[in-house]
Image (spheres, rainbow, N blue to C red):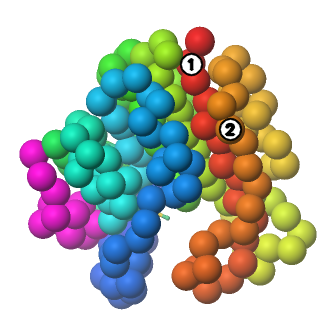
Amino acid sequence: MAEQDKVKWDKKYSENTEFLSYRSAAQMVEEYYHCCGGKRVLDLACGAGRHALFLSKRDYLVDAVDISPVALNHLRQQINDNVTLIEADLDTYIPQKESYDLVIMTNFLDRDLIRRAKEALKVGGLFIVETYMEDEANEKEGYNPDFLLQPQELKQIFSDYEIVAYDESWNESYEKRRMKKQAITVRKR
Ligand SMILES: C[S@@+](CC[C@H](N)C(=O)[O-])C[C@H]1O[C@@H](n2cnc3c(N)ncnc32)[C@H](O)[C@@H]1O
């Protein structure tokens, strides 16, 4: 599985260089990062690194994990010393326990990884997730349903956390086809 993901994503990034171009941070990250109570961040499936870049410029220390060497090599050229790049398969990656003030997962869904990453968060820290959800108006066809959230699912996944903010909205206008997204910011009790 990991090898397949690496090949698939390396090909995507190599053939569509716009995926590596600058994108702004997700709205919930911009709005809530400073409420996390510390400086250590885990950016899961960081891709081209929009959040690692945004946060490292603000003096946060970011561990940025992804499986794609193409994406990570591109990001390597732009980072400062505040970012540590980690090439790893998130299907099996186990982040260090109770080490992070902020965990971010955007445009990526692995429910078991969320479970493992919850343990990596310090008490009082924030977890921000934003990704695609099931919706009959979605324009992208053939999407693997395992990678789509069900309505309100993030609230259930984080029912043991304090919900700071929750939102459902359309994806960014630079994406070719409209898809519904769900976003949540939660605090570990
Ligand atoms: C749609 S991109 C999201 C990038 C970034 N989080 C953002 O919101 O801009 C999905 C990322 O997941 C990474 N990915 C896919 N499968 C993975 C796996 N098994 N382990 C680690 N990263 C993976 C891909 O390489 C890709 O960079």
Mark 2 neighbour density, 10 Å: few (under 14) some (14–19) many (20 or more):
some
Image position, residue 37 (x, y; %): 40, 23
Which residue corresponds to the image point at 30% horizontal and 30% vertical from the top-left? 40
Q: Could you tell me the amino acid type at mark 2? A: Ala
Question: To which residue does mark 1 refer?
Answer: 188
In the image, is residue 157 part of the stretch drawn in magenta?
Answer: no
Element on which disc 1 rests: loop
Image position, residue 70 (x, y; %): 25, 69
**Is residue 156 or residue 174 the one in the foreground?**
174
Element on which disc 2 rests: strand
Q: How far is the residue under mark 1 from the one under mark 2?
A: 13 Å
**Is residue 11 or residue 129 the one in the foreground?**
129
Quarter location, residue 34: top left
The label nearer to you, 1 versus 2, is 2
Question: To which residue does mark 2 refer?
Answer: 165
Relative to residue 16, is residue 120 depicted above or below? above
- Which quadrant does ligand 1 occupy? bottom left
**Is residue 61 or residue 110 the one in the foreground?**
61
Residue 108 in sight from this viewpoint: no
Q: What are the residue bounds of the magenta stretch?
A: 70-81
**Is residue 188 or residue 86 the one in the foreground?**
188
Q: Could you tell me the amino acid type at mark 1? A: Lys
Quarter location, residue 141: bottom right
Relative to residue 13, is residue 154 depicted above or below? above
